[in-house]
């Protein structure tokens, strides 16, 4: 066997090839190259042989078979083992020491407009991938260069003698990344061509904004877990749906009742389980005309989820835990909404929903048994981030560590229930987040604030507004005929939030919707009414760093707080709760969500 080192060179991108050939020749390395590569080296006057010198077979099938041959691959894959060496000797094959290869430009080809499948197919490199994979597999002995940028470093190391283990390892890693990226591009192309629209791949009109094209949703190894029954989803619709669905699924599993969520911009505006509605609640939630609502817990859940913060729910994406019935679809049909995701639809309910928005209303059916894999991956600014999915389970059992009062027994069932609603909601809310809940529903949610007290205030103010809507002055509003639901919601929000415009056109616009203009609330009226709100539960997605949060929560009828501990101020936070008669429960899992 010859002791001369051997390099196989087969490159599509011929950048730096001649410098490489020169360097190899200077080190007395025998160069074997595929057709075009050999030609270029030869024309420049460097010594080179065709790969056929060792395969004794010509390139064939118009280049489809160039380097695919046992003489090449046994030479690359052989280890420094007696048995491997015997096999090589039997076949008169020499070991290959260096492989230099880069692949056909599949990505560039398929990026061209209107590329045909045969054109793409011809760019699928087989022999090159095999060279790279074989050499990378045997990197203990073989050096694989798949990037022209590495030639110079390789040659300078070669001049000094051997290629080091660490360089071979690094080149092998790069080679594996190169073939993985290449294969991903091929499967992406064929996923779009062959998967069947909606089965595994879905082209989206655009991403977060209209100028962000192209956009798509896909799964790599399985079918998409949802079907589009009507409309066509946008990128943010899917972000909402895929956050809202697990929320309602978990709420139902935790509390055993149908659940609903109303999402906007990837945070819930409301979430609830199905509990019977009082006549006042029906009025406040604009559902007193919905037939059959008293016998549909799902409709009750959505009425509560949508009713919590009607302003924020405008144009929502809805998630429902159960098969959608007619009462639920009837509520949806009256509201401005973008779409719904649920495990199924009664025929009559689907008919109602399909008519919405001139047939453009988005209706998704999710496979209720779908469980995503444990690892989540996304890229941000070109960097891939990976984490274990947040599969922490929240249930009434999560609220058994009562810090204060010290002599407290177990929480009342309603408090454990409402803390569960608030906490599961936080799990799917952009952080920081704080949630107020009562009667099995969210009543105020502060999402996406950098400061915790701002979350607590925002959510508290929303809870206050929610409660003010039950005041008899609001319940008794006489609307001008023809006033639309969103205009009613806007006017109520101005009235209850105390943000009434003083005068001018703004005031006129506010007053225009009433038959009889309701007087503003005085601070005394407000205070007296707020005193009647009680038993509210608050959950926080992370610890309270300061006592101000407890003070603010207590102003909105809060009786129970659940939060993780771990703040330097824990002691003071607990003491403040104790002083205010608030039960403080340690919820052990931090629930940041982004
Ligand atoms: O069609 S192939 O998959 N069949 C092969 O056996 C083969 N061996 C190397 N393409 C093959 N290659 C590729 O040819 C290399 O990956 C490289 O990109 C290209 C170099 O061809 P040439 O030397 O003829 O320019």
Image (cartoon, rainbow, N blue to C red):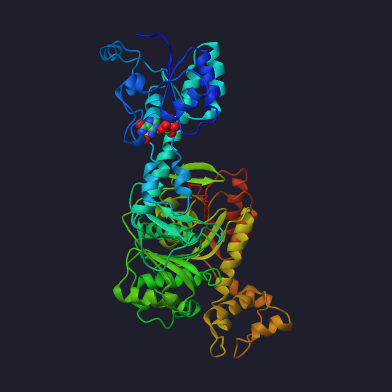
Q: Residue 464, relative to residue 149: is it above or below?
A: below
The image quarter in which residue 578 lies: bottom right
Look at 58% across and 55% down and name the residue there. Answer: 577
User: Which quadrant is the N terminus positioned in?
Assistant: top left
Residue 500 vertical placement versus 560 (above, below): below
Q: Is residue 526 left or right of residue 318?
A: right
Does 84 sit left or right of 502 as displayed?
left
Q: How many marks do you count on the picture?
A: 0
Residue 433 rendering spot, x and y as whole percentages: 56, 56
> Does residue 129 show up?
no
Q: Where's residue 374, x and y in %?
A: 39, 44
Q: Residue at x 50, y 19 (%)?
A: 46
One can see residue 537 in this view? yes
Quarter of the picture for ligand 1? top left
Compared to residue 374, the image places residue 474 above or below, namely below
Q: Residue at x 32, y 58 (%)?
A: 367
Residue 61 image position (x, y, % from top left): 32, 36
Q: 3 or 204, which is in the foreground?
A: 3
- Residue 282: quarter of image: bottom left
Is 62 placed above or below 259 here? above
Q: Position of residue 120 (x, y in %)?
A: 39, 46
Quarter of the image where one finds residue 360? bottom left
């Amino acid at each position: 066997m010859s002791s001369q080192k051997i390099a196989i060179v087969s490159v599509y991108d011929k950048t730096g090839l001649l410098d490489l050939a020169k360097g190899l020749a200077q080190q007395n390395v025998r160069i074997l190259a595929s057709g075009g590569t050999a030609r270029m080296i030869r024309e420049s006057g460097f010594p080179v042989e065709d790969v056929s010198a060792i395969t004794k077979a010509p390139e064939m099938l118009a280049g489809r078979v160039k380097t695919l041959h046992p003489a090449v691959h046994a030479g690359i894959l052989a280890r420094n083992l007696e048995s491997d060496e015997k096999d090589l000797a039997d076949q008169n094959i020499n070991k290959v020491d260096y492989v230099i290869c880069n692949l056909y430009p599949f990505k560039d080809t398929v990026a061209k407009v209107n590329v045909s499948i045969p054109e793409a197919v011809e760019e699928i490199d087989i022999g090159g991938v095999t060279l790279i994979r074989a050499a990378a597999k045997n990197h203990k002995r073989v050096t694989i260069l798949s990037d022209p940028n590495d030639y110079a470093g390789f040659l300078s190391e070669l001049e000094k003698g051997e290629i080091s283990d660490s360089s071979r390892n690094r080149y092998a890693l790069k080679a594996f990344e190169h073939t993985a990226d290449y294969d991903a591009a091929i499967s992406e192309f064929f996923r779009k061509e062959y998967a069947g629209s909606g089965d595994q791949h879905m082209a989206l009109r655009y991403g977060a904004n209209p100028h962000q094209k192209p956009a798509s949703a896909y799964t790599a190894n399985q079918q998409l877990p949802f079907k589009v029954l009507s409309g066509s989803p946008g990128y943010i619709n899917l972000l909402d749906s895929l956050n809202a669905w697990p929320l309602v699924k978990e709420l139902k599993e935790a509390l055993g009742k149908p659940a609903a969520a109303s999402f906007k911009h990837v945070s819930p505006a409301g979430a609830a389980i199905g509990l019977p509605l009082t006549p006042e609640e029906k009025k406040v939630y604009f559902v007193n005309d919905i037939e059959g609502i008293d016998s549909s817990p799902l409709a009750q859940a959505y009425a509560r989820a949508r009713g919590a913060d009607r302003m924020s729910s405008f144009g929502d994406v809805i998630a429902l835990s159960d098969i959608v019935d007619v009462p639920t679809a009837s509520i949806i049909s009256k509201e401005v909404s973008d779409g719904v995701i649920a495990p199924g639809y009664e025929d009559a309910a689907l008919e109602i929903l399909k008519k919405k928005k001139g047939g453009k209303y988005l209706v998704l059916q999710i496979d209720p048994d779908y469980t995503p894999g444990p690892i989540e991956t996304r890229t941000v600014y070109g960097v891939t981030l990976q984490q274990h999915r947040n599969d922490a389970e929240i249930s009434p059992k999560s609220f058994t560590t009562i810090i204060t009062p010290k002599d407290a027994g177990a929480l009342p069932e309603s408090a454990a229930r409402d803390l569960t609603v608030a906490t599961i909601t936080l799990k799917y809310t952009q952080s920081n987040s704080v949630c107020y809940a009562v009667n099995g529903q969210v009543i105020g949610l502060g999402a996406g604030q950098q400061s915790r007290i701002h979350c607590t205030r925002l959510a508290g103010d929303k809870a206050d507004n929610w409660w003010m809507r039950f005041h008899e002055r609001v319940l008794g509003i006489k609307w001008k005929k023809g006033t639309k639901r969103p205009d009613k919601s806007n006017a109520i929000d101005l009235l209850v939030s105390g943000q009434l415009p003083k005068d001018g056109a703004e005031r006129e616009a506010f007053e225009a919707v009433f038959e009889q203009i309701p007087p503003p609330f005085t601070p005394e009226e407000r205070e007296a009414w707020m005193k009647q709100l009680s038993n509210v539960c608050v959950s926080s997605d992370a610890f309270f760093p300061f006592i101000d949060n407890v003070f603010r929560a207590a102003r909105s009828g809060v009786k129970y707080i659940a939060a993780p501990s771990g703040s330097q101020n824990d002691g003071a936070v607990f003491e403040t709760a104790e002083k205010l008669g608030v039960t403080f429960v340690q919820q052990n899992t931090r629930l940041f969500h982004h």
